[in-house]
Image (cartoon, rainbow, N blue to C red):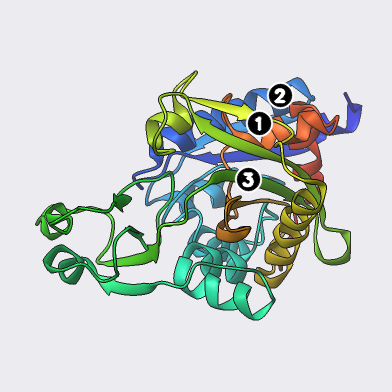
Amino acid sequence: MSASNASTHVAVLMGGWSAERPVSLSSGKGCANALRGQGFTVTEIDVGRDIAEVLARLEPDVAFNALHGPFGEDGTIQGLLEILAIPYTHSGVLASALAMRKDRAKTVMAAAGVPVAHGVTRSRFEVAREHPLPLPYVAKPVADGSSFGVYILREGANSPPADLARADWPLGDEMLCEPFIPGLELTCGVIGYKAGAEPLDIIEIRPAGGGFYDYEAKYSKGGSIHVLPAPLKPNIYQKVQEMAVRAHEALGCRGVSRADFRYDEATDTLVCLEVNTQPGMTQTSLVPELAAHRGLVFGELVTWMVQDASLGR
């Protein structure tokens, strides 16, 4: 513990009003407790629409961004923090907005040589009327996370997902539809920026009940089995790490990010599904596990993130 940490006031931003609010609250509380354990002065903020007023009154030295989903992960809160001149963690305005918009991010990643699944973006009403791609395919909100609103349409699915036409659908009007890639679910963390960006190791994720890595599998204790390091051939392991760093750099990410992949061993096909600029920091989350495997325990990880905080990210 550093004696100088106590003089640094960290506001941990959590909660918010997106569908990922419960995950954000869990991430935020875990990070706040770890930062207190490292000697920082910490204020937890459940973010509401008055966040600018709250932060202006509080005047923290650093904002630790533990928000997930729209308004916390899409460049919105980052722009506010720039205006208020409060240094913050994770990626900046442009990288956050770009990575959150999955179809735009794929265009940038593909141009940088990162393999991606070639899909189409359609309104949710179009997807509810007719299949936009040959079966099997995946339909997911173009700007949400935590597997909310994801549909896997398998061979033999006669009808498209009619739920997408619901009047109370809460996850935006655009859906990204991609061919379903069978095989292994992989994830790789990246820490740092530009020439200093380094890959962490790779986890293979196996939902405990089989099937899809959905919200329950992600956040329920025992909901998934994490195989670390992932049992891949050395050349594939190296390629996943290389592509994770390349995606991180292409999008302009800062701090910590996590890239998710599918790898089909039968056809030797690797695709990057997305880059998460605000990876979860709960007790079941992947990045803390990856960092610990590398020897960076949770308290040290969040301390590094605070020390890395800046403006103009």
Query: In the image, residue 287 lies at what x, y percent?
Result: 67, 38
Residue 282: image location, x then y, percent: 56, 29
Q: Amino acid at mark 1?
A: Val
Q: Tell me which numbered mark, 2 or 1, is placed earlier along the sequence.
A: 2
Please say if 206 is above or below 117: above
Instruction: Using the image, tell me which numbered label, if any, was put on residue 36.
Output: 2
Residue 142 position, x and y percent, is 38, 64
Residue at screen point 34% across, 73% down = 121
As shown in the figure, which amino acid type bears the numbered disc 3? Thr
* Residue that numbered label 1 is attached to: 42
Residue found 52% across the figure and 67% down from its top:
97
- CA gap between label 2 and label 1 equals 6 Å
Label 2 vs 3, first from the N-terminus = 2
Q: What is the spatial separation of the Cα atoms under label 2 and label 3, in whole angstroms?
A: 29 Å
- Contact between labelled residues 1 and 2, with CB atoms less than 8 Å apart: yes
Residue 167: x, y in percent?
9, 57
Q: Secondary structure at mark 2?
A: helix
Q: Which residue is mark 3?
A: 187
In the image, taking residue 58 as reference, residue 302 lies left or right, namely right
Q: On the picture, is 168 further left or further right than 181?
A: left
| Labels 3 and 1: the sequence-earlier one | 1
In the rendered image, the vertical position of residue 201 relative to residue 56, given as above or below: above
Nearest the camera: 72 or 60? Answer: 72
Report the Cα–Cα distance between label 3 and label 1.
30 Å
SS for dot 3 = strand
